[in-house]
Image (spheres, rainbow, N blue to C red):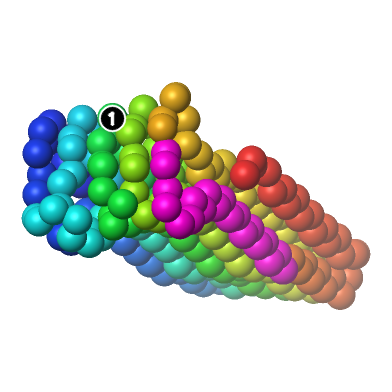
């Protein structure tokens, strides 16, 4: 979903305090579980696909901001805040006399753009402070696992795919500012917690596999661009911050009391982006 807050085309906007807020909070939670029981052969698949996407934007454009009274103090604050969270548990279990096959699969994806921008903004007041802040926080936590048990043959697979792809930016564009303080801040924080585990047990042959693929990507930008003219009596702060974390736990256990057991675990983690 998209959330936009904007002030546009105000030739004379008189105020001593202006707050512009674009805020988007999205939470997805699910539990997908199955149990297959059979006197002969049992098999089943549990799967979940979760996706959060959208734009959150705060914009002040083609406007002039003036104090209520000459030389009075003015505070202009613009904030774009986006929070996306996914919680997922997927499990399939099969128990049978002859053979059992169980698979658990989860795909979790967050794709967000968070922008805070002034475009062709004019302020001429040495007692005015302008604060722009774009904040993104994306969080994925997923568990995928199951059990396959049989007296003859058992096979179990647990697969999880987690991806965060965000762009967070705060900028002053083509603006004329003669003021006291300016701050332009962009902050991005991404966290992926992933658990993938499988258990296969049989009286003869057992096989188990666990796979986890995690990718966290974000571009975080704070900038003053395109010929903006900034005169600040005190401070100008331009700050971009990015924090990415991936915690990945993978396990596979195979128990074959007769012919043998085979188990495999694979994890792939990647963090990319520019700040």
Q: How many marks?
A: 1
Pick the quarter of the image with the C terminus: top right
Is residue 85 rendered magenta in the image? no
**Residue named by callout 1:** 120
What percent of the width, then of the height, locates residue 133?
40, 54
Residue 222 pos. (x, y %): 51, 44
Q: Quadrant of residue 101?
A: bottom right
Give residue 252's quadrant in the image.
bottom right
Taking the image as shown, residue 140 lies to the left or right of residue 215, namely left
Q: Was residue 237 drawn as part of the magenta stretch in this picture?
A: yes
Q: As rendered, which of 233 and 36 lies closer to the eye?
A: 233
Please give the name of the residue rendered at 47% of the width and 30% of the height, measured from the top-left corner: 225
Callout 1 secondary element: strand
Using the image as rendered, state which of residue 108 and residue 175 is in the foreground: 175
Nearest to the observer: residue 70 or residue 191:
70
Residue 179, given in percent of the width and then of the height, sits at: 34, 49
* Residue at screen point 51% across, 53% down: 237
Is residue 185 visible to the viewer in this orientation of the structure?
A: no
In the picture as drawn, the residue positioned furthest to the right comes out as 259
Q: Out of 135 and 107, give the one closest to the viewer.
A: 135
Mark 1 Cα-neighbour bin, 10 Å: few <14, some 14–19, many ≥20: some
User: Does 95 appear above or below 173?
Assistant: below
| Horizontal side, residue 178 vs residue 5: left or right | right
Q: Residue 267 occupies which quadrant of the picture? A: bottom right
User: Which stretch is magenta?
Assistant: 230-249
11 vs 217: above or below: above
What residue is shown at x 10% (from left), y 44% (from top)?
A: 13
Q: Which residue is depicted at the point 72% across and 59% down?
A: 210
Q: Main secondary structure of the magenta part?
A: strand
């Amino acid at each position: 979903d998209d959330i936009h807050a904007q002030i546009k085309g105000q030739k004379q906007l008189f105020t001593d305090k202006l707050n512009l807020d674009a805020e988007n909070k999205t939470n997805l939670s699910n539990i997908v579980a199955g149990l297959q029981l059979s006197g002969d052969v049992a098999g089943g698949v549990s799967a979940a696909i979760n996706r959060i996407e959208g734009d959150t934007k705060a914009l002040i454009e083609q406007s002039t901001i003036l104090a209520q009274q000459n030389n009075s103090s003015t505070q202009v604050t613009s904030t774009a805040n986006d929070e996306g969270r996914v919680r997922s548990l997927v499990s399939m279990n099969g128990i049978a006399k002859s053979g059992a096959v169980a698979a658990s699969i989860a795909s979790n994806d967050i794709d967000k753009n968070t922008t805070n921008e002034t475009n062709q903004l004019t302020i001429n007041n040495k007692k005015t402070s302008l604060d722009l802040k774009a904040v993104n926080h994306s969080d994925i936590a997923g568990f995928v696992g199951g059990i396959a048990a049989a007296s003859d043959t058992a096979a179990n697979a647990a697969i999880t795919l987690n991806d965060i792809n965000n762009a967070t930016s705060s900028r002053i564009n083509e603006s004329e500012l003669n003021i006291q303080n300016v701050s332009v801040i962009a902050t991005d924080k991404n966290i992926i917690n992933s658990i993938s585990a499988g258990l296969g047990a049989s009286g003869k042959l057992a096989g188990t596999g666990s796979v986890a693929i995690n990718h966290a990507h974000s571009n975080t930008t704070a900038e003053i661009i395109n010929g903006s003219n900034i005169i600040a009596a005190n401070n100008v702060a331009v700050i971009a911050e990015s924090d990415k974390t991936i915690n990945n736990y993978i396990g596979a256990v195979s128990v074959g009391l007769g012919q043998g057991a085979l188990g495999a675990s694979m994890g792939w983690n990647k963090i990319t982006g520019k700040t």
